[in-house]
Image (spheres, rainbow, N blue to C red):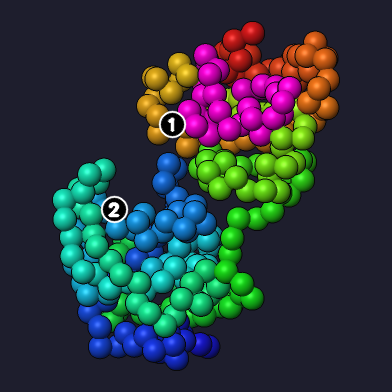
């Protein structure tokens, strides 16, 4: 077994004598640490805290990836804390030098048997086992094919903000019928896209607003709050030529509404 602390020591980062905490960053509906990592903003994401969780000299950061697996996200020096603008506290941190090549590549095995997300390294650090070292750092995956699309709103926002080439190329070249699933209630909304920009242009609107101008979803977000869009999952039911006749695409949209019973009160479609 190779311990993470021993691997870091080989890179010149010694933690045994440090007053350090382990940040076990877990996914939230509206704010995902993994999405922040993919966007290159994990440091800033982590610096926003609702409590003084980093009353220590150093933070070792891990991002939960399911089960007992965690992605190593870096070791940061804590330089200070100030009142935050969007959260109660805003920390100032600095990535320690020498171990950058390990960030996003080291997968750690650790079974957390408590709810706390901020724990002392001198108590738990020795239990962090290196499960795998990836050939390259994790990044946004390429377009998986139309039949395999199933993404949450947070990921859609990331793909649009990054203008991820394979996703943009694939989705902008087709129109079709898509499905939005409310993963909290199970209710669904069936919509369609046609014309220039195809599905990409339509989904960009959802990424920007959460409702994409759809009256039913706009009303839902007004009642539940903007954060509720984090519950939306997007997938594709069928694709068409984006220049296909609108009547044809609308007919296919209505077909899926009937099949899936997506109209109110069972779903979110009003007509």
* Screen quadrant of the C terminus: top right
| Disc 2 element | strand
Q: Name the residue: 64% across, 30% down.
A: 201
Q: Name the residue: 83% across, 27% down.
A: 241
Magenta residues, start to end: 189-217
**Left or right position of 195 against 102:** right
Look at the picture and state if 197 lies above or below 136: above
**Left or right position of 90 against 264:** left
Look at the picture and state if 259 lies above or below 120: above
Task: Say which of 247 and 50 sits in front.
Answer: 247
- Tell me where residue 81 appears, x and y as whole percent: 18, 60
| Disc 1 element | helix
Q: Quadrant of residue 138?
A: bottom right
Q: Which mark is residue 228?
A: 1
Residue occupied by mark 2: 48
Contact (Cβ within 8 Å) of mark 2 with mark 1: no
Q: Name the residue: 48% across, 72% down.
A: 103
- Tell me where residue 29 appears, x and y as whole percent: 44, 43
């Amino acid at each position: 077994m190779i311990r993470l602390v021993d691997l870091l020591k080989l890179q010149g980062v010694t933690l045994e004598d440090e007053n350090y905490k382990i940040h076990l960053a877990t996914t939230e509906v509206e704010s995902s640490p993994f999405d922040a990592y993919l966007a290159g903003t994990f440091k800033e994401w982590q610096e926003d805290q609702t409590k003084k969780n980093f009353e220590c000299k150093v933070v070792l950061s891990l991002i939960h990836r399911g089960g007992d697996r965690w992605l190593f996200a870096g070791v940061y020096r804590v330089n200070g804390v100030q009142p935050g603008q969007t959260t109660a506290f805003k920390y100032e941190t600095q990535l320690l030098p020498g171990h950058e090549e390990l960030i996003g590549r080291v997968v750690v095995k650790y079974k957390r048997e408590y709810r706390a997300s901020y724990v002392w390294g001198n108590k738990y650090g020795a239990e962090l086992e290196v499960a795998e070292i990836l050939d390259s750092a994790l990044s946004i995956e390429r377009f998986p094919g139309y039949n395999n699309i199933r993404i949450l709103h947070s990921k859609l926002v990331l793909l649009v903000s990054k203008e991820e080439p394979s996703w943009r190329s694939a989705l902008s070249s087709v129109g079709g019928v898509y499905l939005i699933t409310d993963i909290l209630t199970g209710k669904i909304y069936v919509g369609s896209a046609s014309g220039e920009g195809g599905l990409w242009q339509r989904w960009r609107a959802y990424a920007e607003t959460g409702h994409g101008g759809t009256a039913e979803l706009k009303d839902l977000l007004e009642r539940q709050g903007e954060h509720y869009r984090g519950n939306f999952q997007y997938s594709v039911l069928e694709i068409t030529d984006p220049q296909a006749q609108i009547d044809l695409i609308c007919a296919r949209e209505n077909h899926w509404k009937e099949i899936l019973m997506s109209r109110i009160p069972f779903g979110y479609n009003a007509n």
